[in-house]
Image (cartoon, rainbow, N blue to C red):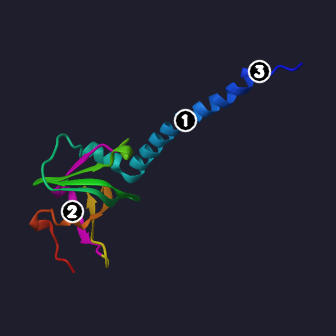
Amino acid sequence: MPSTKRDSRLVMPNDYYRAALLASIPLLWCGICLVLSWASGWWVLAKQFPARSRVDGPVARMRTGSIGPIHYHSMLTFVAAEHGIRISIFLPFRIGHPPLFIPWEAFLNIRDDSKLFSQKVKMSIGQPAIARVVFPGWVKYHMPLEMRFPAS
């Protein structure tokens, strides 16, 4: 008469595969975040412009912007200060994206990129340019007056 017990050797490999899959998801997530940081130029910016302390000033959360070729949709936080702007990314995506503090003097080639229902500003960071960025119009209105340009 055949045994009605399940053989544990037949069940265990499936459990191992499930555990390996569940363990690989966070590793894959970390890898994707690190690749995006490297591809956008955020990693290089973080080395040159690290945010060493908190900044007090007007805050814009969950804003959209681009750094290099990478588009960060509704995950950037900007804090404007007298001497520069602090940029950070929404927490689940922060791996490889430490907060930045970029002084206003580092922004060059500032130009308006407003369309019908959106206001954006395009700029380069650093001399020579480390990264080209597209930030929301909010950033333009918090720059020092001498850096702003007339809206067209």
Nearer to me, 4 or 39: 4
Q: Nearer the viewer, residue 75 or 14?
A: 14
- Crowd tier of the residue under label 3, counting other residues whose Cα lies within 10 Å: few below 14, some 14–19, many 20 or above: few
Q: Which badge, 3 or 1, comes first in the chain's sequence?
A: 3
Residue 143 included in the magenta stretch of the image: no
Q: What amino acid type is highlighted by mark number 2?
A: Val
Which quadrant of the structure image shows residue 111? Answer: bottom left
Q: CA distance from mark 2 to mark 1?
A: 40 Å
Nearer-N-terminus badge (3/2): 3
Q: Which residue is mark 2?
A: 139
Which amino acid, by three-letter code, is at mark 3?
Answer: Lys
Q: In x, y percent, where is residue 10?
A: 74, 26
Magenta span of residues: 97-114
The amino acid on which the numbered mark 1 sits, given as a three-letter code, is Leu
Inspect this view and state whether residue 95 appears.
yes
Question: Is 38 left or right of 45, judged from the image as shown?
Answer: right
Residue 22, label in figure = 1
Tell me residue 106's x, y (percent): 20, 56
Given the current orientation, which residue lies at the most extreme right position?
A: 1
Which quadrant of the view contains residue 21? top right
Q: Residue at x 36, y 51 (%)?
A: 41
| Quarter that holds the C terminus | bottom left
Q: Which residue is mark 3?
A: 5
Residue in view at x 28 percent, y 42 percent: 47
Assign the N terminus to one quadrant of the image: top right
At horizontal 42% and vertical 51% (from top left) the residue drawn is 39
